[in-house]
Image (cartoon, grey):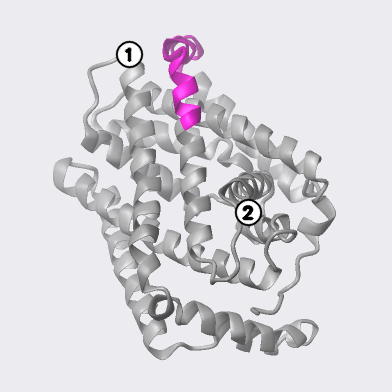
Amino acid sequence: MPRVSVSGVLTAIAGLALLVFVVWRVGVAEIAADIRQVGWGLLLIIVIGGLRFLLRAAAWRLCLDPPHTMSLGNAFAAVICGDTIGNLTPLGPLVGEPAKAALVSRHVPLGPAVTALAIENVLYTLSAAAMIAAGTVALLVSFQPPSAVRGVGTLAVGATLVLFAVALWMLWRQPALISRALGLAPPLKRHAARMVEIEARIYSFASRRRGALPALAAAELGFHALGIAESYLTLWVLPGPPPSLLTAFILETANRLITVVFKFVPLRLGVDEAGTAVFAPLIGLPAKTGLALAIIRKARMLFWAAAGGVLLIREGVSGRARSVQIPSAD
């Protein structure tokens, strides 16, 4: 497991304080009553969360170049453990993503595992950006948010268009950005040549593995579709009128945005709950419904974090997960 840092502890304490404040403002009794309403629905929400991990694991496997391969079970366990590590430390993906490659190093050489993981993360990032932009457009068109929210939403859509433009430019020009940056840092200079190989494999993936692209797109889209299903199910079991798919879609979009912006906050403690409670009234839902939804989502996260912790203890990989170095792409 990752070491506990002072910044991580302080961030977690601040998040917990924010959570307590928001729950107190909205109403402890009302929130507790809403959460009790979920009942056995929480089990299905947890299962949906597991299926989302499974789709990310399947996408990672699809990004591996033959003859390298790994079982879906090994990839699934590594994704859960990496997510656990990333959620419990302020460094987030900077620690969690390399840990995934370390966790499967007994089955796949680190080079191909890291390359495939980088490709999957690029595809996931682009799909998440597209979803955030689509949800923002849906919010602006279907509702009447305050002018400040409309301004932020317009910026978010513009930023997504810029991101895709940059991605297309990079595929066209194939700049060796990371390897050049490593070359400028003396302690990391020895890794630059290896990173050139990894970057070249990332840029050429679409041309090498055209047959895998439809399945990859389906896996990434399925991940987001299950997120919408989770939001819809949670709203459905909570008190109130039946939800619409549009509402669930926009709420999941807000969740993606909070996840991206506040990834450095362990478990997004406090910011997820506060952000969803503030956002819910923008689409006609009570703040307490948004807060209850976020707390239920946190229960799902804690379940899978506990599962990841058990797997990490069983594998005994804490030392390897912290000492991952940039490997050869071969």
Q: Main secondary structure of the magenta part?
A: helix
Seen in the image, is 53 located left or right of residue 10?
Answer: left
Position of residue 211 measured from the top left corner of the image (x, y, whole percent): 36, 69
Give yes or no for residue 33 being in the magenta stretch. Answer: yes
- Depth check, front residue: 52 or 10: 52
Quarter of image, res 166: bottom left
Judge whether residue 281 is colored magenta: no
Q: Residue at x 63, y 58 (%)?
A: 97
Relative depth, front residue between 276 and 55: 55
Q: How many marks?
A: 2
Q: Residue at x 53, y 59 (%)?
A: 61
- Characterize the local packing of mark 2: few (<14), some (14-19) or many (20 or more) Cα atoms within 10 angstroms: many
Amino acid type at mark 1: Pro
Left or right: residue 288 versus residue 268 is left
Which span of residues is magenta-colored? 26-47
Q: Amino acid at mark 2?
A: Gly
The circle on residue 239 is 1
Image spot of residue 327 (x, y percent): 71, 75
User: In the drawing, does residue 200 fall left or right of residue 255?
Assistant: right
Which numbered tag is attached to residue 318? none
Q: Is residue 152 visible?
A: no
Looking at the rendered structure, the secondary structure element under dot 1 is: loop
Q: Nearer the viewer, residue 164 or 70?
A: 70
Residue at the farthest left position: 141
Q: Which mark is residue 92?
A: 2
Q: Tell me the crowding category of disc 1: few under 14, some 14 to 19, or many 20 or more residues within 10 angstroms, Cα based.
A: some
